[in-house]
Amino acid sequence: MLLKKHIAASVVVSTALYFTFHSMAAAVSSCLAGILIDLDHIPDYIYSFGWKGFCYKDFESVCRHGKNKKFFLVLHSYELLLIFLTISLFTKNAVWLGIFVGFTQHILLDQVSNSVYRFSYFFFFRLKGNFAKERMFAA
């Protein structure tokens, strides 16, 4: 999913979170988490193409079309969501709630909008397949 769509979705979800819990901390952390989760695409890009000549337009195209050699995507994982949920429940902290909500909405949107296998957003599924793109993308 394109960054601008993730930004729009994060703003909508974070606004709903604010009106539900009346917490600016939850809303802001949700919005930031829903957007910044995509920072994990940068190491994948650098692994595949190197840092020299980095261009955002090329980076976006590579991400959109799954041209990386490997897909580590350490932040795009359901396992991490479980950790964030657990921290959120035990600490009852609005920031952790926001992080959990932001990451969750981002990964779910990626899951339904990208041509990926059902288990592609499980880190251990990718690890078992040596992070190969063939284990990530269905098409």
Image (tube, grey):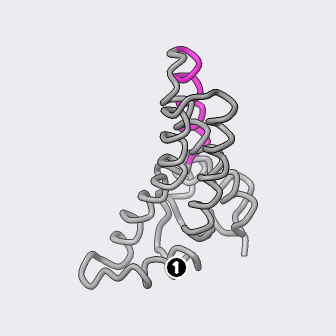
Frontmost residue, 65 versus 85: 85
Whether 101 is among the magenta residues is no
Give the extent of the magenta segment.
77-90
The residue at the point 39 percent across, 79 percent down is 56
The residue at the point 35 percent across, 82 percent down is 55
Going by the image, does 118 lie left or right of 136?
A: right
Marks counted in the figure total 1
Find numbered disc 1 in the image and state the secondary structure of the residue it sits on.
Answer: loop
**Figure check: 53 above or below 128:** below
Quarter of the N terminus within the rendering: bottom right
Quarter of the C terminus within the rendering: bottom right
Q: Which residue is mark 1?
A: 67
The residue at the point 64 percent across, 27 percent down is 21
The residue at the point 61 percent across, 44 percent down is 14
**Figure check: 44 above or below 23:** below
The percent coordinates of residue 23 (x first, y second) are: 56, 29
Going by the image, does 107 lie left or right of 53?
A: right
Whether 87 is among the magenta residues is yes
**Residue furthest out toward the left:** 52
Question: Which amino acid type is shown beneath numbered disc 1?
Answer: Lys
The percent coordinates of residue 58 (x first, y second) are: 43, 84
